[in-house]
Amino acid sequence: MRFVFGKQSWEPLWDSLALGAFGYFFAILATGIYAEYYLAPTDFIALLYLGRLAGLRVSIQHWRTVSVGLAYVCLVVSSVATSTLLVLDAKENVIRRTDLASFLEEYHTDAHEKTVELYFPKTDGLLMAELSSYLHYKGLRLAGLNGPADSDKSEFVFAGPDEHPLGRCLPYKIYLCKHIDTLEKGGLTVFLPSNLVGKSDVEQVTKNSTILVSVKSWPENSLIGRGLRLLSKLSPLERETYRRSEPWWQFYIFRKRN
């Protein structure tokens, strides 16, 4: 902020935006609640603010106009591509969590089992804890938690291939997760959009399971798919999610046959 470091006058619009961005950034640090897309507003304001400062400077030093302009354009393109991918990724995951909750609310087993395993083969304990919290909020019966006393609805048990200390998704959370190597008959396997789901994963599960839900976002050869691929090339993100030549986000639910 120029009025602090450059001893220049306070500008109500630009300096207020800068202070707000600083406050937002430090609030994220203070709460410890962080995801990559949370910083998109801060990035956007920083780009505008720095771009304006660069414009004011090059008006005085014309010989730097081209270099500063090109650097700013590269920064804008990279930031926009990264923010767009992260926001779309977050949105897709929120939508599919809602779909999962809606599916489980209406799910009834053929044999009316009292307990149904939800197996997440590619999901870590943190995400399973978040899902448990959301499903509990939606009123679903989860193992180890006091849910609605509805005998017609099954109780769901979160499970995965990882070891879970104390039988919890996270040691400091109340939500239960268990380690299993083989899913029992009637259990549900779930692949979320945040998982790196490949064709081989789907083929492996379908050998002894039936697909109940299959949702794919945009295929690679569609107009939106090609646009997303272009964004991934312009973005500095290293995540494999944005490098693979598969449908961008996938959501599956399978039921084990035997």
Image: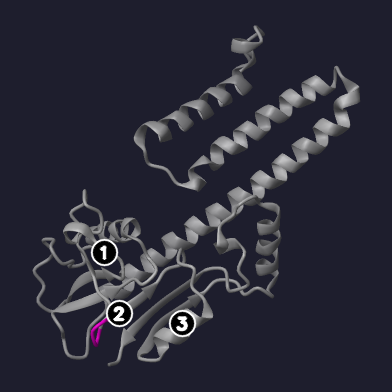
Give the secondary structure at mark 1.
loop
Eye-nearest disc, 3 or 2: 3
In magenta stretch: residue 183: yes
Residue beneath label 2, please? 188
Q: Are the residues tagged 1 and 3 within 8 Å (C-beta)? A: no
Distance in Å between CA atoms under marks 3 and 2:
14 Å
Dot 2 or dot 1, earlier in sequence: 1
Q: Amino acid at mark 1?
A: Glu
In the figure, 28 relative to 176: above or below? above
Residue 65 x %, y %: 86, 28
Give the secondary structure at mark 2.
strand
Q: Amino acid at mark 3?
A: Val
Residue 94 x %, y %: 42, 60
Main SS, magenta region, reads loop
> Would you call the spot at circle 3 few (<14 residues within 10 Å), some (14-19), or many (20 or more)?
some
Residue 81 x %, y %: 65, 51
Please state which of residues 5 and 200 is positioned toward the viewer in this rendering: 200
In magenta stretch: residue 76: no
- Label for residue 163? 1
Distance in Å between CA atoms under marks 2 and 1:
19 Å
Residue 165 x %, y %: 21, 58
Distance in Å between CA atoms under marks 1 and 3:
23 Å
Instruction: Magenta stretch: give its range.
Output: 182-186
Residue beneath label 3, please? 202
Dot 1 or dot 3, earlier in sequence: 1
